Image (cartoon, rainbow, N blue to C red):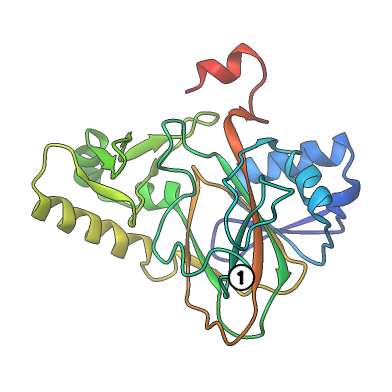
Amino acid sequence: MKITPLPVGFGAEIAGVDLRRADEGMADLLRAALLEYGMLVVRDQSFTPEEQLAASRLFGDLETFPAMRGQLQAWPEIFRVASRPEDGHVEVGRYWHSDGSFREEPTPISFWYSEVQSEEGGDTLFTDLQRAYAELQPDIQQEFDSLKTAHRNGVVHPLVLRHPKTQVPALYLNMGLTAGVLGHSADHSRALMEAVDRHYSREGATYRHHWLPGDVVIADNLHVGHKATPITPATRRILNRTTIRADDVIWYDGAAKQAAW
């Protein structure tokens, strides 16, 4: 297995790996690499749904999703994102976010597999949330350290979220689902969120992934955020996404897992 850091300063490309055949030694290397780099890119994979579930479980137990049009009825663990509604969910996530931030215990890891991909459109942008915090001015860090944000469903998280394994702080904000910043007016909340949005997108801070068939991207959602870009239904694209449960992520076992959140 070869690990090549991406030039943007976070994330790494993994070569020489068939995730269908990862033994425990290789799984340990992948887990350590994900924790270090925040995102892994693995090319040229080929999965059945069962094989994707098995590869995803290298990182923990999986969340499940309700049966809906375009989803795979026999595999509720797979959330399909697509360019056409008959193939999955369309026009989702076109703003900076981390998957599962609306949960009381946020979703720690996402795993995408490119099943069908068009030549143009539908790229995904990624940004380092830990670096976003580290590059704030100290007075802004101090201000943000005390703030909490409320999702539209009422779930509250700190704006600066420390990684439960490494304790590294990250600027954690879902641009699409956050209702506001606690203790601030709607106008102030909107201005703060717009400033964070610009900061996430600052020059040199993002990695743009152009999907190819067989691509796998694995992201630590507490380290790296992402944002979808548009794709037309005139072209066919299917991304199969699985996500790891916070109460059974591979970083912990037994009582340590429960104590971390």
Residue 200 left/right relative to 71: left
247 versus 134 height, above or below = above
Q: Nearer the viewer, residue 131 or 73?
A: 73
Residue 7 left/right relative to 227: right
Mark 1 burial class by Cα count in 10 Å: few <14, some 14-19, many 20+: few
23 versus 232 height, above or below = above
Q: Quadrant of residue 24?
A: top right
Point 25% across, 50% down: residue: 137
Instruction: Determine which residue is flagged by label 1.
Output: 86
Q: Where is residue 191 shown, x and y percent of the image? A: 16, 58
Q: Nearer the viewer, residue 196 or 228?
A: 228
Q: Residue furthest top?
A: 255
Q: Where is residue 248 shown, x and y percent of the image? A: 63, 27
Point 50% across, 29% down: residue: 164
Residue 261 left/right relative to 78: left
Residue 17 left/right relative to 115: right
Q: Where is residue 1 shown, x and y percent of the image? A: 85, 52
Q: Amino acid at mark 1?
A: Glu
Point 58% across, 75% down: residue: 84
Q: Where is residue 2 shown, x and y percent of the image? A: 81, 56
Q: Nearer the viewer, residue 41 or 118?
A: 118
- The local secondary structure at tag 1 comes to loop
Point 76% across, 45% down: residue: 53
165 versus 134 height, above or below = above
The count of marks equals: 1
